[in-house]
């Protein structure tokens, strides 16, 4: 669905809902400009580490 929306519209898409460090790369590669994350950070034992992992996942998708 995200890939189809990215093809149809020029509006930047931000994905939210169920985003984790494990799937963020795939989400951005599917067409999202970025991700909005709550649970994966708020409920992490180490918020800083979780944030860094998510940032790395998004950066990986962009390279």
Image (cartoon, rainbow, N blue to C red):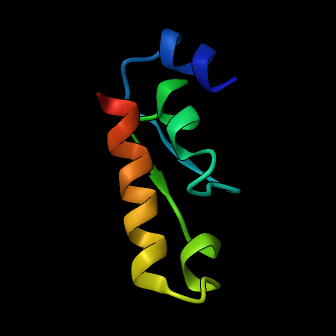
The quarter of the rendered structure image containing the N terminus is: top right
**At 61% from the left edge and 71% from the top edge, which residue is drawn?**
40
Percent from the top left, x then y, of residue 44? 60, 83
The relative height of residue 26 versus residue 55 in the rendered view (above or below) is above
Q: Left or right of 14: which side holds 23?
A: right
Q: Nearer the viewer, residue 38 or 56?
A: 56
Q: Left or right of 29: which side holds 10?
A: left
**At 29% from the left edge and 28% from the top edge, which residue is drawn?**
63
Q: Nearer the viewer, residue 34 or 29?
A: 29
Quadrant in the rendering for residue 52:
bottom left
Quadrant in the rendering for residue 53:
bottom left
Percent from the top left, x then y, of residue 24? 54, 46
The relative height of residue 59 versus residue 42 in the rendered view (above or below) is above
Q: Nearer the viewer, residue 4 or 29?
A: 29
Percent from the top left, x then y, of residue 25? 50, 38
Quadrant in the rendering for residue 51:
bottom left
The relative height of residue 52 versus residue 44 in the rendered view (above or below) is above
Q: Nearer the viewer, residue 1 or 25?
A: 25
The relative height of residue 2 versus residue 18 in the rendered view (above or below) is above
Residue, far top: 7
Q: Is residue 12 visible?
A: no
Q: Left or right of 62: which side holds 22?
A: right
**At 57% from the left edge and 84% from the top edge, which residue is drawn?**
42
Q: Is residue 34 visible?
A: yes
The tally of labels here is 0
Percent from the top left, x then y, of residue 49? 43, 76
């Amino acid at each position: 669905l995200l890939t189809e929306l990215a093809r149809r519209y020029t509006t930047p898409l931000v994905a939210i809902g169920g985003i984790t460090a494990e799937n963020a790369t795939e989400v951005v590669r599917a067409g999202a400009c970025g991700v909005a994350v709550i649970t994966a950070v708020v409920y992490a034992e180490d918020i800083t580490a979780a944030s860094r992992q998510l940032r790395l996942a998004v950066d990986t998708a962009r390279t």
